[in-house]
């Protein structure tokens, strides 16, 4: 799943660090500090990879019983192309590599590698190499792929009550009638450091935790997988969710000589300047406020907080979208030159579309972040709404807080998914004994985004800057589409997601630097759900049918 809270969190952590340092400085003036130097404990060698586990099962999709073979295992990739080329499929140095084997007594000095865990499902009886294969992953960055695996398209699925926080275990893990195995073989991949994937060697975090480093790891994994399972001639698809969408964009540009048949982008964000988490820290960039507005409107519609309730959602959203990029965006761009009369008029219009009080909108200078909206819309009831799905709700942590302090949607489903992946992998797929499955790397302390290298070099663009800036991977997707003009792109998302607002994805696609003729290669599918469209059974069926149709229409020649 996708955790994009980090900008505001990092700011808070930085402030806390400054306070601690100041306090330490004051203490130093009055007390004598005795420094005790302790030896750094040696880094233990990594445990050997567990052998692949091969099992068989059957899932019924659309009334059709589909027998399949499941392979749970790992593939090891290097941090550079030359290092990766020296590794065999077993992760060991090839005899003719010319490289010196690492000193096993000093694992911390070995070249960095990532042992990437995957679960692959192959439909038995499928026409071999010509059958489609889809690589799936969640985002974060720093999230495992247990969400898409156990919620969307794997042969087993954990069922949760839509918009509610269910009681604790036992959870309902059932056969998934919406699995994509009816149209494609599936490969669920855990990012380096998540799930059962592990990173090893010198400077391992720097080697794999970054926009380009991460995409290179997935690129090398896919090439190795195609070789190991003899699938080079299969129709190939990428399906990424949330941060998995910029990963797909960068990855599509890196997969030279691997023409993809299609890319499915679920809950899209390709330009980080469009994020709505903390736009106040990026003044002068006004787009996030306009791109979030239709999601605010959909949320107010759902919670019946609009002054006048429209009869239907989608026609109402079209009106809001036009206002967002027209009158509203124009007012924001005027900055301090906006007249008070016009500001009042825009605030009154925003009230009609969001349900927020006019006085609050004026106080906010017409600029409301996603967190502030989630806290304010139902503030009189003491209710905080979800971030990943604004249909979810929960009691305020702090009635006086300015913004939402947690995500009721994430809290509602995380335990069920964590339980399901651990139960399923160990019990049915017979993998992971005595290993820890990491749902994400956030549990390791600071959010991964604090360590994530956001620098990015677009294909053919200038070198990555020495400092991070608003990462924008639209050029990568554009290059991939122009290099492979037959490749199709499918966008999907939920109207009630403000982590990656649906209108952001639409806006970004219409600003891709591609010929107008290639816009026809992009299709749009949006649903009355949130970030994880698959938590709603009815929507999951629609999503399955749309993705299945997309694959069928692009896999045949």
Image (cartoon, helix red, strand yellow):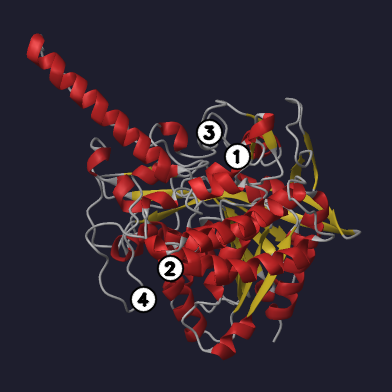
Give the spatial CA distance, label 2 vs label 3: 29 Å
Residue at which label 2 appears: 473
Residue at which label 3 appears: 405
Give the spatial CA distance, label 1 vs label 3: 12 Å
State which quadrant residue 545 falls in.
Answer: bottom right
Task: Give the left or right position of residue 274, taking residue 506 as reference.
Answer: left
Badge 1 crowding class, 10 Å Cα cut-off, few under 14, some 14 to 19, many 20 or more, is: many
Foreground of the two, 321 or 33: 321
Mark 1 or mark 3, which is nearer to you?
1
In the rendered structure, find residue 459 and report the number of the disc placed on it. 4
Q: Earlier in the sequence, mark 3 or mark 4?
A: 3
Task: Give the left or right position of residue 445, taking residue 291 as reference.
Answer: left
Residue 57, position as x, y percentages in the image:
77, 49
Marks 2 and 1: CB-CB under 8 Å?
no
Badge 2 crowding class, 10 Å Cα cut-off, few under 14, some 14 to 19, many 20 or more, is: many
Mark 4 or mark 1, which is nearer to you?
1
In the rendered structure, find residue 376 and report the number of the disc placed on it. 1
In the rendered structure, find residue 412 and report the number of the disc placed on it. none
Give the spatial CA distance, label 4 vs label 2: 10 Å
Q: Earlier in the sequence, mark 2 or mark 1?
A: 1
């Amino acid at each position: 799943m996708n955790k994009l809270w980090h900008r505001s969190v990092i700011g808070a952590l930085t402030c806390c660090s400054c306070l601690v340092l100041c306090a330490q400085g004051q203490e130093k003036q009055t007390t004598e500090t005795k420094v005790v130097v302790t030896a750094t404990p040696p880094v233990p060698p990594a445990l050997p990879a567990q052998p692949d586990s091969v099992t068989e099962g059957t899932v019924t999709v659309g009334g059709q019983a589909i027998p399949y073979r499941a392979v749970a295992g790992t593939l090891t990739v290097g941090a550079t192309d030359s290092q990766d080329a020296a590794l065999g499929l077993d992760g060991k140095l090839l005899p003719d590599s010319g490289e010196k084997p690492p000193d096993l007594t000093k694992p911390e000095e070995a070249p960095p590698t990532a042992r990437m865990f995957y679960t692959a499902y192959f439909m038995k009886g499928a026409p071999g190499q010509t059958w489609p294969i889809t690589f799936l992953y969640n985002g974060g960055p720093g999230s495992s792929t247990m969400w898409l695996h156990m919620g969307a398209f794997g042969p087993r699925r954990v069922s949760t009550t839509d918009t509610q926080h269910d009681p604790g275990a036992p959870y309902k893990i059932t056969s998934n009638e919406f699995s994509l195995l009816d149209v494609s073989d599936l490969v669920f991949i855990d990012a380096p450091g998540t799930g059962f994937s592990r990173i090893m060697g010198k400077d391992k975090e720097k080697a794999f935790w970054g926009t380009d480093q991460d995409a290179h790891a997935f690129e090398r994994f896919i090439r190795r997988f195609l070789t190991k399972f003899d699938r080079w001639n299969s129709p190939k698809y990428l399906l990424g969710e949330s941060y998995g969408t910029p990963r797909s964009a960068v990855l599509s540009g890196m997969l030279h000589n691997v023409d993809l048949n299609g890319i499915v982008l679920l809950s899209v964000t390709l330009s980080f300047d469009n994020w709505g988490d903390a736009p106040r820290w990026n003044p002068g960039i006004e787009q996030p406020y306009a791109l979030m507005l239709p999601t605010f409107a959909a949320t107010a519609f759902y919670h019946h907080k609009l002054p006048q309730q429209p009869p239907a959602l989608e026609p109402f959203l079209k009106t809001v979208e036009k206002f967002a990029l027209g009158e509203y965006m124009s007012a924001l761009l005027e900055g301090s030159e906006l007249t008070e009369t016009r500001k009042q008029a825009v605030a009154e219009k925003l009230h009609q579309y969001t349900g927020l009080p006019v006085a609050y909108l004026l106080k906010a200078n017409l600029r409301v972040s996603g967190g502030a909206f989630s806290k304010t819309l139902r503030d009189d009831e003491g209710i905080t709404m979800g971030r990943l799905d604004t249909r979810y709700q929960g009691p305020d942590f702090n009635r006086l807080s300015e913004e939402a302090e947690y995500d009721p949607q994430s809290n509602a489903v995380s335990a069920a998914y964590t339980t399901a992946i651990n139960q399923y992998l160990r019990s049915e797929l017979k993998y992971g004994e005595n290993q820890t499955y990491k749902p994400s790397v956030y549990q390791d302390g600071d959010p991964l985004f604090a360590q994530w290298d956001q620098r990015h070099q677009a294909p053919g663009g200038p070198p990555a800057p020495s400092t991070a800036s608003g990462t924008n991977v639209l050029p990568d997707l554009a290059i991939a589409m122009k290099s492979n003009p037959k490749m199709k792109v499918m966008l999907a998302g939920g109207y009630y997601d403000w982590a990656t607002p649906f209108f952001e994805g639409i806006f970004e696609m219409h600003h891709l630097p591609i010929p107008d003729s290639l816009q026809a290669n992009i299709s749009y599918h949006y649903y009355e759900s949130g970030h994880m469209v698959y938590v709603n059974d009815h929507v999951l069926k629609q999503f399955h049918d749309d993705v299945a149709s997309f694959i069928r229409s692009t896999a045949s020649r």
